[in-house]
Amino acid sequence: MVLHGACDLLKGKKFTGYPGTENSVSGAMFVPERVVVDGALITSRGPGTAGEFAIAIIAALENREKADEVAQRALLKH
């Protein structure tokens, strides 16, 4: 959450973050999900969502099939 205030990275975007961040960003829409993808922007709630965040990044950089494969191998998906 440090960067968004300085750079307006979230302006016009959906995002998620730690509880309390929903009111700290103007011009953006807080979504209470563990990981939120809005275009090239990927946000997560915190350290407990690191695995899901990593899978979202893999899906964005590679593709959903590769992300699902990694998630399954990492035991993040059944």
Image: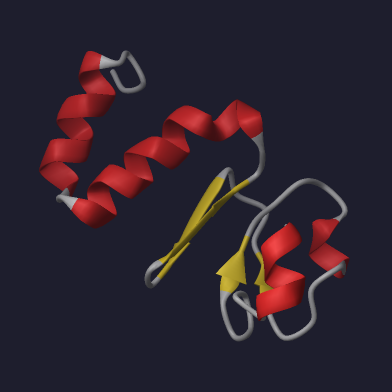
Residue 35 x %, y %:
52, 48
In this view, 15 is above or below 34? below
Which one is nearer the viewer's eye here, 12 or 77? Answer: 12
Q: Residue at x 74, y 75 (%)?
A: 6
Q: Residue at x 38, y 72 (%)?
A: 39
Which one is nearer the viewer's eye here, 65 or 50? Answer: 50
Q: Report how many numbered discs are placed on residues in the image.
A: 0
In this image, 11 relative to 24: left or right?
Answer: left
In this image, 59 relative to 30: left or right?
Answer: left
| Quadrant in which residue 52 is drawn | top left
In this view, 4 is above or below 75? below
Q: Residue at x 36, y 21 (%)?
A: 76
| Quadrant in which residue 11 is drawn | bottom right
Q: Say which quadrant the N terminus sits in.
A: bottom right
In this image, 69 relative to 35: left or right?
Answer: left
Q: Say which quadrant the C terminus sits in.
A: top left
Residue 32 x %, y %:
67, 53
| Quadrant in which residue 47 is drawn | top right
Residue 69 x %, y %:
15, 28
Q: Residue at x 38, y 69 (%)?
A: 40
In this image, 55 relative to 2: left or right?
Answer: left
Colour basis: secondary structure
